[in-house]
Amino acid sequence: MNRAPMPLARSTSEATLIPLPEDLEAAHDTLGQCALILERIDTPPMDLSAAVAALELAFDRVYAAYRAVEDPAECLPAALAAVATFQSELARDAGHPMLTIVRDLAGAAERHLNEAETRLRAAPWAPPASVREFRASLRQPRVHDLVRPNLVAKVRVAKAAAPEVLSPAPEIATPTTFAELSAAVAGLRERSAARARPPSEEEAPALPDAEVPPEAAPSPPGEPAWSRRRFTEDRALGAFEEVLLAWIQRLPIAGERWQSAIFIEQRMLSGIDALAALGPAALEHLDTLTLGNPTCTPAHLSALTMALGCVDGRDTLALAERLLHEQESVGPEWADAFGSALALIPHPDASRLAFRYAHSAHVAHRALGVRALVRRGVFDRELLAKAALDEPLVAAEALPTFAQITTRDEASPILDQAIERSEEHAALRSATLRALSANCHLSAEALLFQDFHGKDNAEAGILLAQNSGRAGANKILEWVRPRPTAAGAEALGWTGLVEAVPVLIAALASPDEPIQAASAEALERITGARLLEEVEIPPEQIMDPDVPDPVPDDKPSLARQVSPARDQPESGSPDRIERITRDPQRWRAWWAQNGGNFERDQRYRRGYAWSPQIVWTELGRALATPGDRRWLKHELSLRTGAILACDPHDFVAHQELVLAAFEPTAAAARVTPGSWSEAQRR
């Protein structure tokens, strides 16, 4: 069965979610902790295979209750019985400290399951509707509903050390004479030497016929036919690798339009459809390809979340969560990878899961949950207000959106606290500046100019240019004119001042390459002249959509980093891309010829009189990095008073539909093209 795709123009209003059942979620989380602890015991004191089988059965029955393919009132008693068996198996070694912790956790899971059973026993149950044929995902992902067993992650535990069984040696009589003593010593030496010698082939015990491994039997001539399962797993490997590579490459490379990513996205969606079409065996094999893969990377977690997020059932998301929980202690990039995919998947439980993470006891999980909810267009004012006062990692995710959906008076106390708290935390300071800008806070312009002036902060300069009228733009110009910097040149480009053009042309003569690059981009942003030049960059740098300009050349390539010192690969042929020229003579000649077409009292963007409609056009059609497109999105929301619910990392189809739906809002903004005005809170 295929559900209709999620609406691409996701609602930007405040949303009230029905939370996931807390009793089942708490039981599931506690059982997950049991699995993680068991996997971390290097030398188990006993054979854990029976305990693991009971634990996996408990997971299976919990997922059956979630999916409602069976009556939950019958599934939960079976889960409780499996947990009881799990506890009794662990009790065989009551003294091991790790197993004691696991037993205590299993007891907590048992209590949560009892609560869930009491709740669900009175709830009516109806069998789910029959499944329908598959439908391909063309421009956006679909949810596939399969007839399948529950997807349970394998619990991989170490084997207990086998006890060494030795046959008792014959006793040596107590010597009473020197001759007997010499004979006893010689016998002991012979025994010691015999133990040290490996057994000869003649002495090695022969295996009975029934125990001869299949590999020892002679193979029939020719290559044997693959089993259906092996064929499915091989195709699943190819499909998952396609999803993984497409995820890594889906953002446009430097110099390409963002819409070009749709071809990579279609490859990824085809791989996801193939995994679903291959059936349950393919989905089960994803466990081996990720949790069972010692070379797994954060990109694997994103691809796994993306693939399983298109298959209905709480168990599919749980497999991706299991990989997150196994690896998140390694570094923050694992939580980022999971959150990036969670923001995009069409799974019916994705927003509910993000909501639960946003209420987690772990700071990194709360940040992940808030970020995913905001990306999905689910805005809970109460949650965002609480998160804005949370730890800096969480507050940085919540503040900008909270400021957008809250009135100035209501947001002022929280934003005032954020100003004080952000002095020592860079990420929180960045979020605070964007929040002050979005809310048109009374202290916004003064604080933005303070950071721009005192710290040469490019972000503060851009926000100041977007919020200010003619007076603020002139202040930026007067500050930059005598002492051009890269941050100052970038801010001047966002002002749209005609008087800034000669200053930026002069800055091109600076020996500082970042100043040259920022000045050239700023000139293009104001004039739209499209004066291009071809340059060479290292091969791997072109894959970064936010490729730095200038391109650093001191960092070794990825191929060199992973290759041994004695077998370093060649650097490879450089790639050629077009960029805005940094030749001041070409710019002076162009300005001398075309400068008369620009009126000094108007504001410009890419050669047109500035207006929200022009910003909307630039966001949808201009060649711009994801970073620049986020600034354009902020400017458009700021100047129209409406939230634009898309991100440059969203699927191209979603961005296109949201931008098309937003065009009337941009066109209806009461702004005279080219006029100067300050952003006002609407």
Image: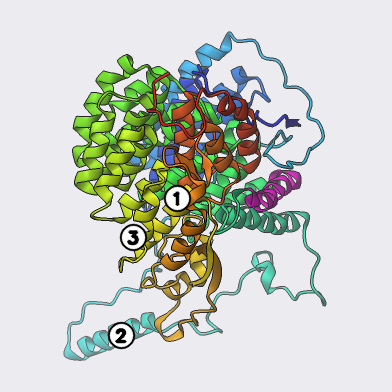
**Circle nearer the N terminus (2, 3):** 2
Q: Secondary structure at mark 2?
A: helix
- In this view, 125 is above or below 148: above
Circles 2 and 3: CB atoms closer than 8 Å: no
The residue lying furthest to the top in this view is 122
Location of residue 481 in the rendering, given as x and y in whole percent from the top left corner: 27, 52
| Residue at figure coordinates x 59%, y 52% from the top left | 250
- Which contiguous range is marked in magenta? 259-280
| Residue at figure coordinates x 25%, y 84% from the top left | 184
Q: Which quadrant of the rendered structure holds the C terminus?
A: top left
**Circle nearer the N terminus (2, 1):** 1
Let me know if residue 606 appears in the view: no
- Coloring applied to the structure: rainbow
Judging depth in this view, the residue of 381 and 639 nearest the camera is 639
Distance from the alpha carbon under mark 2 to that under mark 3 = 94 Å
Judging depth in this view, the residue of 215 and 423 nearest the camera is 423
Task: Give the prevailing secondary structure in the magenta stretch.
Answer: helix
Q: Which residue is mark 2?
A: 187
Q: Which quadrant of the rendered structure holds the N terminus?
A: top right
Circles 3 and 1: CB atoms closer than 8 Å: no
Judging depth in this view, the residue of 231 and 485 nearest the camera is 485
| Residue at figure coordinates x 66%, y 48% from the top left | 262
Location of residue 2 in the rendering, given as x and y in whole percent from the top left corner: 74, 32
State left or right for residue 28 relative to residue 150. Answer: left
Let me know if residue 25 appears in the view: yes
Q: Which residue is mark 3?
A: 507
Q: Tell me the kind of residue under disc 1.
A: Asp
Q: Quadrant of residue 166?
A: bottom left
Q: Which residue is mark 1?
A: 47
Q: Secondary structure at mark 3?
A: helix
